[in-house]
Image (tube, rainbow, N blue to C red):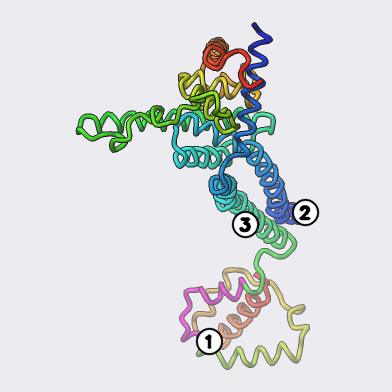
């Protein structure tokens, strides 16, 4: 009977302990999100070119990450989060492709006469020697060149170079082999070097 | 070539890092709100499973402990407690008229039991064959039936 009573007491305490654990988990998760929220938004924005869409993608990725992968070890969080984000970006690409195909068949213009968003961007290169290259222009130039890369090259470059993921982690996040990660990364950096120049921003 | 690539990569990362600080206030607020939305959504959903698990486990333990208590109680006490005998008396096929006819006798018997608590100790065992002859309605049978019922009430059978 004493054993049963002990079991009962332990069982009654379990929800309380679980709540404390949950609170700690939430704090860790908050810290993790704080560290990756802005880069994740930038990456999503590079991929989908639209601020609100990028915010939605990051939001969806965060929700899914919390509900599905929060129990995984913290060392895996980054790669798993970017894997989810990449999947969301791919889903967004597919849905946009289907939507634009339907609009094309129905004879409607995708962006109501706005044209290709890449063409809408201002040319970041200075028009004359008098133009001073400010921080914003430098970033816009980089943004333009990153957007000109293929989706996979762009994302592999950002994950490897900026987020510091290993080849293995990047391959997991992108859902491709380690060999193709290396190839995409090499091609991306080669193209950026050709476009930006070897001594860009020095 | 590797040095050139590394230098370029470093410069690009610098620019990207700096661009994070240049995010406009409205977007920055929305970005920081995203994580709270996600955490809030999970918080509203998460505790339900452990809570219900706890409830189910507690209920199970309570049921098991009540069952074990009852088993232990039964093993330490006679098989039929007085309450059970009362129930058996009520559930017998005898009509209530039988009891109303005999009510005076039972009143007398209870008085006797109150006055003489040692009455049970002087009882003698009755065979089950004694039952038919108290149905005839004679004085002897009435006495036998009374004695039989006394034994039933006292748990002698």
**Which residue bears the numbered disc 3?**
B59
Seen at 59% across and 90% down, the residue is B105
Q: Which mark is residue A6?
A: 2
**Considering depth in this image, is A167 or A126 the residue closer to the camera?**
A126
- Residue A64 location, x and y as percent? 53, 39
Is residue A82 on the magenta stretch? no
Work out whether B60 lies above or below A173.
below
Q: Nearer the viewer, mark 3 or mark 1?
A: 3
**Which residue bears the numbered disc 1?**
B138
Q: Do the residues at pointers 3 and 2 share their chain?
A: no
Work out whether A20 lies above or below A149.
below
Magenta span of residues: B84-98
**Considering depth in this image, is B23 or B120 the residue closer to the camera?**
B23
Q: Do the residues at pointers 1 and 2 share their chain?
A: no
Seen at 61% across and 88% down, the residue is B106
Q: Secondary structure at mark 2?
A: helix
**Going by the picture, which residue comes out furthest to the left?**
A106
Alpha-carbon span between mark 3 and mark 1 = 58 Å
Q: Secondary structure at mark 1?
A: loop
Is residue B94 on the magenta stretch? yes
**Considering depth in this image, is B132 or B6 the residue closer to the camera?**
B6
Give left or right: position of A5 versus B18: right
Instruction: Write down the quadrant of residue B134 in the picture.
Output: bottom right
Closer to the chain start, of discs 3 and 1, is: 3
């Amino acid at each position: 009977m004493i054993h049963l009573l002990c079991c009962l007491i332990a069982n009654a305490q379990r929800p309380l302990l679980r709540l404390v654990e949950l609170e700690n988990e939430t704090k860790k998760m908050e810290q993790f999100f704080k560290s990756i929220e802005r880069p994740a938004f930038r990456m999503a924005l590079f991929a989908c070119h639209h601020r609100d869409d990028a915010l939605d993608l990051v939001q969806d990725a965060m929700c899914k990450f919390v509900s599905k992968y929060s129990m995984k070890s913290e060392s895996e969080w980054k790669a798993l989060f970017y894997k989810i984000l990449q999947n969301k970006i791919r889903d967004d690409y597919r849905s946009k492709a289907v939507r634009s195909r339907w609009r094309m068949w129905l004879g409607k213009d995708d962006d109501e006469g706005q044209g290709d968003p890449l063409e809408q961007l201002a040319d970041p290169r200075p028009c004359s020697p008098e133009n001073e290259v400010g921080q914003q222009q430098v970033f816009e130039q980089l943004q333009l060149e990153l957007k000109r890369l293929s989706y996979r090259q762009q994302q592999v470059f950002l994950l490897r170079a900026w987020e510091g993921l290993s080849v293995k982690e990047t391959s997991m996040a992108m859902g491709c082999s380690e060999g193709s990660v290396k190839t995409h990364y090499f091609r991306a950096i080669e193209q950026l070097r050709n476009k930006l120049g070897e001594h860009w921003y020095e | 070539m590797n040095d050139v690539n590394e230098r370029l990569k470093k410069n690009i990362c610098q620019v990207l890092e700096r661009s994070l600080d240049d995010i406009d206030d409205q977007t920055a607020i929305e970005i920081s709100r995203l994580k709270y939305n996600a955490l809030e959504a999970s918080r509203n959903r998460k505790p339900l499973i452990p809570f219900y698990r706890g409830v189910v486990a507690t209920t199970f333990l309570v049921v098991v402990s009540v069952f074990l208590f009852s088993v232990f109680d039964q093993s330490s006490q006679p098989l039929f407690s007085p309450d059970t005998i009362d129930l058996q008396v009520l559930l017998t096929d005898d009509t209530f008229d039988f009891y109303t006819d005999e009510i005076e006798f039972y009143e007398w018997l209870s008085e006797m039991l109150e006055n003489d608590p040692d009455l049970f100790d002087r009882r003698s065992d009755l065979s089950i064959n004694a039952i038919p002859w108290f149905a005839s309605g004679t004085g002897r049978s009435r006495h036998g039936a009374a004695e039989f019922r006394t034994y039933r009430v006292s748990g002698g059978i």
